[in-house]
Image (spheres, helix red, strand yellow):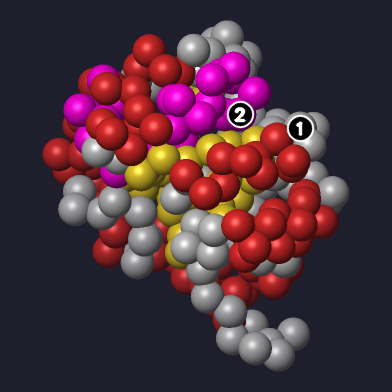
Amino acid sequence: MTHLTARIGPSILSADFLRLGAQIDAVAAAGADYIHVDVMDGRYVPNITVGPPVLRAVRGGTSLPVDVHLMIVEPAQWIDEFVAAGADVLTIHVEADVHVYRTLRAIEEAGAAPGIAINPGTPLVMLEDVLPIVRQVLIMTVNPGFGGQTFIPASLDRIRRMREMIDRRNPQCTLQIDGGIRASNIRKVVEAGADSIVIGSSIFVPDRPVSETMGELRAALAATN
Ligand code: DX5
Ligand code: ZN
């Protein structure tokens, strides 16, 4: 079997917020490719997390790319603020904005790479016509809102179909997935076509060093069975 690779982005949602700087240093030392920041507003999803001040602190504390996942309503109003706070990639949800084309353009103009995310129940065709103007597609593999949920099996087929669509419409575009990824399924999602993997609760495990948890994930990806 072929040796698979993918970029891995730890989601700080599952980190120890009291020791956030140290946790970011630790994942960077363990080979993280970027830092994923989940922004939730209690309206688009039933949870509230962090906003621009925390993003600014993360930005100041790492030289890794910072990938910001907005799970908020009316994301267009917040683009400039999140780019100014340090987002390298800024991803909005296709379900959260009736003018996604305009908002994605605004992200590019503000100086970040635009990304578009899609929930497990939303038809993939919703993304087809913005593919040429995005640099990342995020397929949610759980319903957004919380870390530590179980991967939805139907996602595998969605990843395969999105891979085909990306190869056809914009081969430079990254295919990111987010939710429920662990050592037992990371290989399957990469085989299906994902090239960037967000992982929260399987990296930040209480009482275990992230060098060990990230090592397990990388080993599972490289495994030949
Ligand atoms: C869920 C968030 C994810 C979350 C993933 O709404 O978008 O980024 O942190 O966490 P795990 O890897 O625990 O599913
Ligand atoms: Zn996320």
Q: Position of residue 80 (x, y in %)?
A: 27, 22
Magenta-span inclusion, residue 153? no
Badge number at residue 122? 1
Q: Quadrant of residue 118?
A: top right
Q: Mark 1–mark 2 contact, CB under 8 Å?
A: yes
Badge number at residue 94? 2
Determine crowd level at label 2: few under 14, some 14-19, many 20+ residues with C-alpha closer than 10 A.
some
Q: Residue at x 64, y 53 (%)?
A: 181
Asked if residue 30 shows in the view, the reply is yes
Name the secondary structure under disc 1: loop
Q: Position of residue 83 (x, y in %)?
A: 26, 30
Q: Is mark 2 within 8 Å of ligand 1?
A: no
Asked if residue 149 shows in the view, the reply is no
Q: Relative to residue 162, is residue 56 depicted above or below? A: above
Give amino acid for label 2. Answer: Val
Q: Quadrant of residue 164?
A: bottom right
Residue 184 shown left or right of residue 16 in the figure = right
Q: Position of residue 4 (x, y in %)?
A: 58, 79
Badge number at residue 184? none
Closer to us: 77 or 29:
77
Determine crowd level at label 1: few under 14, some 14-19, many 20+ residues with C-alpha closer than 10 A.
few
Q: Is mark 1 within 8 Å of ligand 1?
A: no
In the rendered image, the quadrant that contains the C terminus is bottom right
Closer to us: 207 or 129:
129
Picture mark count: 2
In the rendered image, the quadrant that contains the N terminus is bottom right
Q: Relative to residue 214, is residue 221 depicted above or below? A: below
Q: Residue at x 54, y 64 (%)?
A: 171
Which span of residues is magenta-colored?
81-104
